[in-house]
């Protein structure tokens, strides 16, 4: 086995401190980028999207529960498939009830949405022992409007904010895409605040990284812009405050 260069403890400490300075700078850049994300403008949803879920057919607003924010993970599961894509499956396998609880403590709900019919989703969900709420957008425009499904018959073939018709094979009429979309609710109004695709999702996994995608962020008092979150929280990694 090839191992890294072997050095003395003093030499290792010098190299580690040099790397630490770069890591701190990357953290500052990440914080600044997250602040810019929270300052993005938003788009009011003019269309009502009906989704099939555990409680029947419900509007998108129902997915928020009592929360002001909603994170939707677009799971690749076409209507004629019998299973979700393996990459999406691996992501959801790592999700826990604790993560969902921590997000809710920051006024943020989380749900899966796929174009596959609900009976197929529920069968797969049971087989994987998932507890994350999962909804079917079959028959609605939700997937198409948020780039989670590309379709040759519709006037949109964009993925990750670029026109990419090559993502649909010659013998295919549509293709499913994996990504994340965030929404904010203010009374009866719902706003689309953010979506990310491709490599934009590969660092997600804990509650902080999910919350960093949203308009309210971590709801901590050091974040910019100030005065947006309805209730501020301490920098508490236990999510119990």
Image (spheres, helix red, strand yellow):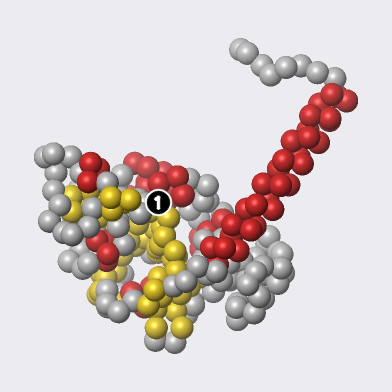
Tag 1 residue? 197
Residue under the image location 44 percent in, 79 percent down? 185
Tell me: 154 left or right of 123: left
Whether residue 64 can be seen here: no
The residue drawn where x is 72% and y is 17% is 5
Give the answer, above or below, for where 21 lies relative to 43.
above
Q: Residue furthest top?
A: 1
The quadrant holding residue 227 is bottom right
In percent of the image, x 53 and y 51: which residue is there? 205
Is residue 31 rendered to the left or right of residue 117?
right
13 sits left or right of 128 in the view: right
Query: Local crowd at mark 1 within 10 Å, few (<14), some, or many (≥20)?
Result: some
x and y, in percent, of residue 204 in the image: 51, 51
Answer with the quarter of the image where residue 117 lies.
bottom left
Residue 192 in view: yes
Q: What is the residue that sits farthest to the bottom in this orientation? A: 187
**Residue depicted at 37% across the width and 60% down the height:** 112
Which quadrant holds the N terminus? top right
């Amino acid at each position: 086995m090839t191992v890294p260069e072997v050095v003395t403890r003093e030499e290792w400490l010098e190299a580690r401190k040099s790397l630490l300075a770069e890591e701190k700078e990357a953290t500052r850049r990440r914080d600044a980028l997250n602040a810019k994300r929270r300052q993005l403008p938003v788009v009011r949803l003019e269309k009502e999207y009906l989704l099939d879920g555990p409680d029947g057919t419900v509007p998108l607003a129902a997915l928020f529960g009592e929360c002001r924010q909603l994170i939707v993970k677009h799971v690749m599961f076409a209507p004629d498939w019998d299973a979700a894509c393996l990459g999406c499956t691996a992501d959801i396998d790592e999700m826990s009830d604790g993560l969902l609880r921590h997000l809710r403590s920051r006024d943020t709900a989380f749900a899966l949405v796929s174009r596959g019919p609900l009976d197929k989703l529920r069968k797969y969900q049971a087989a994987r022992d998932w507890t994350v709420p999962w909804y079917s957008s079959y028959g609605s425009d939700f997937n198409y409007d948020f780039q989670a499904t590309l379709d040759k018959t519709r006037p949109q073939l964009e993925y990750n904010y670029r026109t990419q018709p090559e993502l649909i094979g010659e013998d295919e009429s549509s293709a499913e895409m994996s990504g994340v979309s965030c929404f904010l609710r203010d009374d009866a109004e719902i706003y689309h605040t953010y979506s990310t695709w491709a490599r934009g999702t590969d660092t997600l996994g804990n509650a902080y990284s999910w919350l960093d995608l949203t308009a309210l962020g971590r709801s901590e008092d050091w974040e910019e812009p100030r005065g947006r979150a309805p209730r501020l929280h301490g920098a508490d990694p236990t999510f119990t405050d």
